[in-house]
Image (cartoon, rainbow, N blue to C red):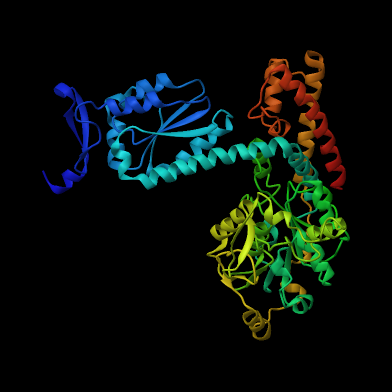
Amino acid sequence: MTDSDKERPRLVESGQGLRFLNIEYKKRFLYSKYDPFRSIRGVIESLSLLEGTLVVICSPGLFYGIDELKRKLPENTFLIAVEADDELAQISENCEIRKDNSEIPLFRWSQLELLDEYVRKLCRSGKCRRAVRIDFCAGSAFSPDKYSVIMAGLTDIIGGFWKNRITLVRMGRMFSRNVFRNIGLRRRSPVLDDVSACVKKDILVVGAGESLDSFMFWDEVKAGSFFVIAVDAALIPLKERGIECDAVVSLESQSVIDSFYVGVKKSEKTVLFADLCSRNEVCMKFKKRVFFLSEYSPGPFIDSIKEKNIAGLTVPPLGSVGLAAVYIALRLRKDEGVNVFTVGLDFSFSVGATHSKNAPAHIQRLFCTDRKRSVENYDAVFSGAGYFTSDKNNKPVCTTKILSMYAAQFKNEFSGAANLYDAGKSGLDLGLQRADDDFIRTRLNYLRSDCSDESCIPDEVFRTDFPPAVEFLNDELEDLETAASLLSEGEDSVFRDSSLTLEKQIRNLLEKKDYLYLHFPDGFEFNSGIQFLKRLKAEILFFIKQCKISIQNSV
């Protein structure tokens, strides 16, 4: 036997009377020499499983104990197997017990993308709520870190799905309503693809964090040295400094965002970059609009929008408007030689202050100040959500789990981008090159960008006409009116197709219109039950109204 053979797993006889096979690998047996079933039986007997559990078999080996485990499983419980070692995976795939349990998916370390896709599809059924790990043999000890990564990933996928479900139940109807309203505006508005790679001057992305107040070059910004992209919360602070930004980014769908645009007039200069599901009333405030799409809920409705190219580029769901602004800035610049600076993207705050001066949160605090409540917001620091950490200068600052998550996501998304600089003097580390005052001054003095209008977004792209947007609305309106008639009049409807059963015709019309039911608590998939259809009828009437309003606004 060669050394290489000793490193490969091999099957050997084991157990009392040598009745069972064992695996010898890397100078150890993966099962007990005397009773290969003893260990796994003890683990299975101690399990307490709930419905909706995904049981992850780590290092299944020869699948000893699988029958006992399957008998232990309650209803709506799912089984998958994962093997991080390719040599052991080959033995697991070819063992005798595996042949009788081929319905259990077995994933290798090299198939993590397939595992991700499988679990996400399982989650969309609404039946998978948690993941539990069970080690079937000692093979899991060879790659403990890999199995920990797999379980952490599965837990994040399942947890993320249910967090998104809660958001959709609360706001899914509003998201879809905004999408329909904004599709009408899309007829006269370009998408992000249409304006990519057109800005030649240096770009300044402005957030509403405290570092905005310490930025020294507002006179140069006012003179047009930068193409300024602001998040919505930074509009008023910039306005107070006499600066009309070149672009503003909007993601928010709720009416609370309206106060961020107080005093904003329809400008010939400022361009609104808006998610298709962002608040329609905000989009109506701007003459120049550029739309993009982030998938708030992957499904047939979003697929149909992408298929007809209504929203153009699909932007990753970044969550934070600051991250979206940086993403857009990198898409807008002519090439990687154009510098992009960020300021006000702190993802942290100091004691008593949460935003820059004149930001909506600061103004609201001023309105509420009286003898009992100071202008300083200490609640943000000493509430359960806030905690102290170190900023990019190793000074103590306060942040929250959500803000620190956005900072970590910023690092993952943008830390490798060329000529992307952090010009803020405070805030969490973003993983970018720091741009101090001297560096920015050098850029302004010696490498001043072209400040002419030609270096910005050309006006021609806003003279667009995109009839497919209105065609999409008319098609949806026709289908919804047909469905409303079928649900109200049944067999007597003028839209009745006698070649299909009534249930089949209604299903064909509505199954792919998931915007009608994705905000239902049980809206994981279409249901032809009478109670479900009654709720759908109310939603159909609501979206018929939205289609008509959107078509009217498209003119």
Frontmost residue, 253 versus 405 = 405
Residue at horizontal 18%, vertical 28%?
14
Residue at horizontal 48%, vertical 43%?
153
Task: Report the side of 76 relative to 540 (left or right).
Answer: left
Number of marks in the rendered image: 0
Say which quarter of the image contains residue 7: top left
Q: Does residue 461 show up? A: no
Query: Up-down: is 448 above or below 424?
Result: below
Q: Does residue 257 show up? A: yes
Say which quarter of the image contains residue 397: bottom right
Image position, residue 232 (x, y; %):
76, 58
Frontmost residue, 159 versus 494 = 159
Query: Up-down: is 110 above or below 127?
Result: below
Task: Report the side of 217 relative to 67 (left or right).
Answer: right
Residue at horizontal 71%, vertical 55%?
380
Query: Up-down: is 389 above or below 26?
Result: below
Image position, residue 453 (x, y; %):
77, 73
List the single residue furthest toward the front.
Answer: 372
Frontmost residue, 279 versus 56 = 56
Image position, residue 361 (x, y; %):
79, 58
Q: Quadrant of the N terminus?
A: top left
Query: Up-down: is 26 above or below 414?
Result: above
Image position, residue 223 (x, y; %):
78, 78
Residue at horizontal 76%, vertical 47%?
253
Frontmost residue, 354 versus 313 = 354
Task: Report the side of 113 relative to 138 (left or right).
Answer: right
List the single residue furthest toward the bottom.
Answer: 446
